[in-house]
Structure formats: C-alpha cells, structure tokens
Amino acid sequence: MIKVYNTLTEKKEEFVPIENKKIKMYVCGPTVYDDAHIGHARSAIVFDVIRRWFEHRGYTVTFVRNYTDVDDKIIKRANEKGITWKEIAEKYIKSFEEDMEALNVKEPSVKPKVTEHIPEIIEMVKGLIEKGHAYEADGDVYFAVETFPEYGKLSKRKTDELMAGARIAPGEKKRNPLDFALWKKSKNGEPGWNSPWGVGRPGWHIECSAMSMKYLGETMDIHGGGLDLIFPHHENEIAQSESYTGKQFVNYWMHNGFVMVNSEKMSKSLGNFFTIKEILEKFSPDVLRFFLISTHYRSPIDFSFERLKEAKTAFERIRNFLNAESVIKNIPAKEIIEGNPLNVEHYREMFYQAMDDDFNTAKALGILFEMIKEANTLKDRAIKEQTLTVKEKESILKAISFVKEMMKVLGFKLEENDKTKNREDELIKLLIDVRQQLRKEKNFKLADEIRNRLKQLGIVLEDLPGGTVYRREE
Ligand code: ZN
C-alpha cells in the first residue's frame, strides 16, 4: 500500500487510483522565459522519482507537464531583448528540455503548450460565463470567487481574511478584489487570439485546468507542483475546474518544498539562484539528484556548495560499493560454512516501506547506506582473510545488484554516463597493466612506486589471486 500526503486533507492517505493500477498525474511546468534553476530541478526530480516509484510498483502513469509559453514575463523578456515572444518561448523550452535530459528526468506522456490549446481554453471560459461563475468586463474575463463557496479549501485561507488585504488595481474592472483573470484583453502589440470577448490571451490559471482536463479527464489522481503554487494558482484551478464540471478536480494534491539559500527561498525574483546548467558544470547530474532527494520532498532544502560536496562524497560511497563487485568475485569462497551473510531481503523490505510511506527517499537512502556499511565490514574481512563463505559471497553480490536496481529506480544514471569517471577508470586499468608487466620483469621498485603514487591520489590497488583490483578511498 502506498501512502501519499494530500495537501487538500493535510493527511497521509492510502493511495487509491480512480482506475485500477492506472494513474493520471499532472505537474505544473515552467513559464519559459529564462534558464531553469535548482528550484525547478527539485520539482522536476521529485515528481520524476514519484512517477518512477509508482511504475516500479506496477502502476501505469500518464504524466502531463505543461509549458506556459505565453505570459507577461515572456512578453517583457522579449521586449527587453528585442526579439519576439515566440522566440523567447522556443529558446527556453529547448533549454528546459536539455536540462531535463541531462538530469535523466523521464519524458512526460504529454507536454502541452498553452498556445496550442487556445480553443479548449476559450471553451472553458465560455462555459464558466454561461454557468454564472465568470463575467466579462471590457474585453477581460474574470472568475467570480464568491460563486464558489469552497474557495480557500486547498490553501486553508478564508475569503474574508483574503478580502482584508485585497485591493483592485487601477485599470482593473473586477467586481471583487479576489476575482482572477481567465482571459486578458491584448494591449497594443501583445500576442492575442480571437475570442467572443475580442482579441486576448488566457490567464495563467485557466490553462492548467483546460489542458489537464483535455488529457486526463474531469477528475485526475494527482496534481503536483511546488509549495508556492498552492495559492493562488492551485486554489484557482480548483475553483474554476470544479465550478465548470461540478466534480472533484483532483484526488491527491502533492507539493514539494522549497530550495533555500541562507534561509530565503531560491527564486528568480530574489536573484539568489543557480541555474541547472551552472551546477552541472561542476557536479554530475547524479550528484545533483542525490543531493535533492537526500531530503524528504516536502521539507525545505538548504542549498550550498558545501552541502553539494558532501552529497558528492556520500554518492561516491555508493559508487565504490558497486565497483567492489569484481573484488568480491575474485575472492575464493569456502564451500561448507554458512558464515554471516547479509540479509538483503530485510533491507529491501525496509527500503520499500520507506518509499511506500509518502516517498521517503531520505530514509530509503539511509537504509541503503546501512546495508552498504554492513556489507563493507564483511568485504574488508574477506579481503584481509582472502576468503569468505559461499553464502556470504552470494549475499554481498546480491546486495550490490539490489543497490544498483534501486538506484536505477530512483532515476540515477550511474557511471556509464559519467564520461570523466570512465576515462579515469580506463587510465587506472592502463596503469595496473603496466605495473603487472613491470612486476613480471622484476622491476618491483617502479611497480611499487606506481601503487604508492596511486594511493596518494586516493586509489587503492589490491593484489588478489585472480588479478589486481582497485577502489577509490572515501
Ligand atoms: Zn499549473
């Protein structure tokens, strides 16, 4: 049984999909006007891991992530740069897709763009006006919040409290300060589409309702996004969708926590952000993923390069464990005695429990480390004594393949995609071959020098009956 924390009910609930073993999932995508930063990477990776875990547990996931490709910010950027808003949108969609591919985020089932769904959006706005939930005012269309008494149910805000702080901006023709735009009249030179209310473009909130309904139906299982989207974006999505269909819009609302820098939220507006591209120049995608999922997805993460380096060291420990496979295989096993094999199934059970409990990746990774620690003790003893029992050997190899399997499930690429590491491995193997040759020629002085110099670099050679193996020191 998988448990999911639902922002709507503020409880962890047993996950029950609308259709058996099938999941309809929508995650709010980026507004494409700049390169994505680590905050975006967190949301993308969190929901990627959630999707992958569901799939691992036998569910089929229809995953929709949109692009907001027309918006005030895009128009502003285009004006600053002296190019068209379309060029800006295309440029940053491409940039985002490069980032997602680098980060090994699975391709969504559908990636709808707002500009390709204008008829669906107009249809929904029309329907909301007909049902008395929206009104036109001089080319704009607004949703009338007072027609939806449940407004505030997701963000737990009360309309009278919201009213206290709300004002109608000059030039806006809203009836009530809480009303929000479904359709915006185009001003001079702004992009626009013909509609029953004149030339205009969609408001931000309506697009997610229209596009999610088109691909997932009137009620979906999961709608996700960053915490900052709860209000007003998701609250407004609920109001307009449920007013339109009369049905519950989303069964489980899931939100990931912020990435913080010096106790402030990382954001474009505060300027305290690092783009995904900047980070990937210094750290591998696996290390960034490891860093971002080492904290539970609902908790805030403090970002610093110091913490990224720590993540790198911890991740290296996993990689070293996986690399120990050949060392273990080379140690001769004793046939008779049972010894002290690892109980890999016990760790697997605990790992699954952690992941099934609202995707507790932090705990799950902790369990892998516990197992690695136990396996390393066994391995080190075996290397020292140059023997271990059949059962022990089997259990360490099983542990290695379990870690590899779970890392893949969590979306790690592991070493085959790490070009520098591969090159380094090739070079180490070359030096081992040279050293082997030197030993054959009885040039032990130079052979030892190679071993010592490698050790200084943190690479430890071990001469085993089956040949020489190496490991990186932690
Ligand atoms: Zn959205």
Image (tube, helix red, strand yellow):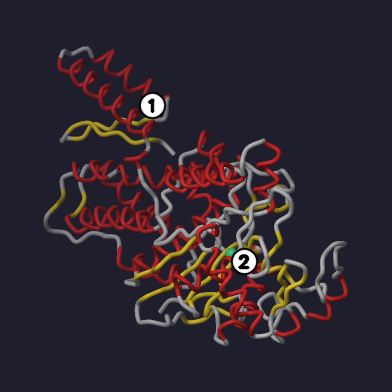
Quarter of the rendering containing residue 235? bottom right
Element under disc 1: helix
Q: Quadrant of ligand 1?
A: bottom right
Residue 195 bears which disc, if any? 2
Residues packed near mark 1 inside 10 Å, few (<14), some (14 to 19) or many (20 plus): some
The residue positioned 50% from the left and 79% from the top of the image is 218
Q: Is mark 1 within 8 Å of ligand 1?
A: no
The residue that disc 1 covers is 455
Residues packed near mark 2 inside 10 Å, few (<14), some (14 to 19) or many (20 plus): some
The residue positioned 35% from the left and 54% from the top of the image is 408
Figure check: 5 above or below 314 = below
The residue positioned 27% from the left and 54% from the top of the image is 401
Quarter of the rendering containing residue 18? bottom left
Query: From the image, which quarter does the C terminus lie in?
Result: top left
Identify residue type, mark 1: Lys
Is 162 left, or right, of 122 in this rendering?
A: right
Identify residue type, mark 2: Ser
